[in-house]
Image (cartoon, rainbow, N blue to C red):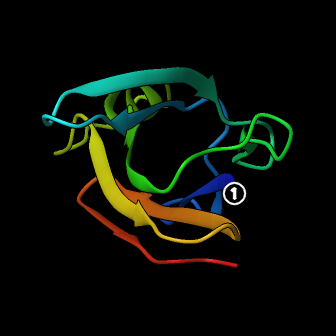
Amino acid sequence: MTLSTHVLDTSTGRPAQGMKVRLEFRKPGDSWTDLGTFTTDADGRVPGLIAGARGAAPGTYRLTFSVAPYFNALSIGTFYTDVTIEFVVRDDTHHHVPLLVSPYSYSTYRGS
């Protein structure tokens, strides 16, 4: 299984470059394992959150996007501090989790 993400700032119509993204995996018993913190590139992407060579198990994952520091760096106030997305991986395919974000709204979907 591979995993990627892409963040678009819908208030500017541009990729959200430099946003911190934390990836976690839920262990049995409801505790979480930190799999790393990443930074979006110039295109707003973190392409290799989980790459094929490293692999990943089926289960529940959580992505936490640090939106307040991103908007603060642009001198834009925001209602949200973090956006957290939990999702379940059931198969061995590629999973893409995009985030569309603005200072007062966000949306996500299962990408391809």
Residue 13 visible to the viewer: no
Local secondary structure at mark 1: loop
- Within 10 Å of disc 1 (Cα), the crowding (few <14, some 14-19, many 20+) is some
Residue at 23% in and 37% down: 28
Residue at 80% in and 39% down: 42
Q: How many marks?
A: 1
Q: Tell me if residue 20 comes above or below residue 12 in the rendering.
A: above
The answer to whether 51 appears left or right of 101 in the picture is right
The answer to whether 39 appears left or right of 30 in the picture is right
- List the single residue furthest toward the front: 28
Pick whichever, 23 or 44, lies toward us. Answer: 23
Pick whichever, 63 or 99, lies toward us. Answer: 63
Residue 82 visible to the viewer: yes
Quadrant the N terminus occupies: bottom right
The answer to whether 28 appears left or right of 36 in the picture is left
Q: Dividing the picture into quarters, in which one does residue 66 lie? A: top left
Q: Tell me if residue 17 comes above or below residue 20 in the rendering.
A: below
Q: Dividing the picture into quarters, in which one does residue 51 lie? A: top right
Quadrant the C terminus occupies: bottom right
Residue at 69% in and 47% down: 44
Residue 37 picture location, percent across and down: 54, 21
Q: Tell me if residue 53 comes above or below residue 73 in the rendering.
A: below
Residue 5 picture location, percent across and down: 62, 54
Residue at 39% in and 37% down: 25
Say what amino acid the circle numbered 1 marks. Answer: Met
Return the residue at label 1: 1
Residue 81 picture location, percent across and down: 22, 34
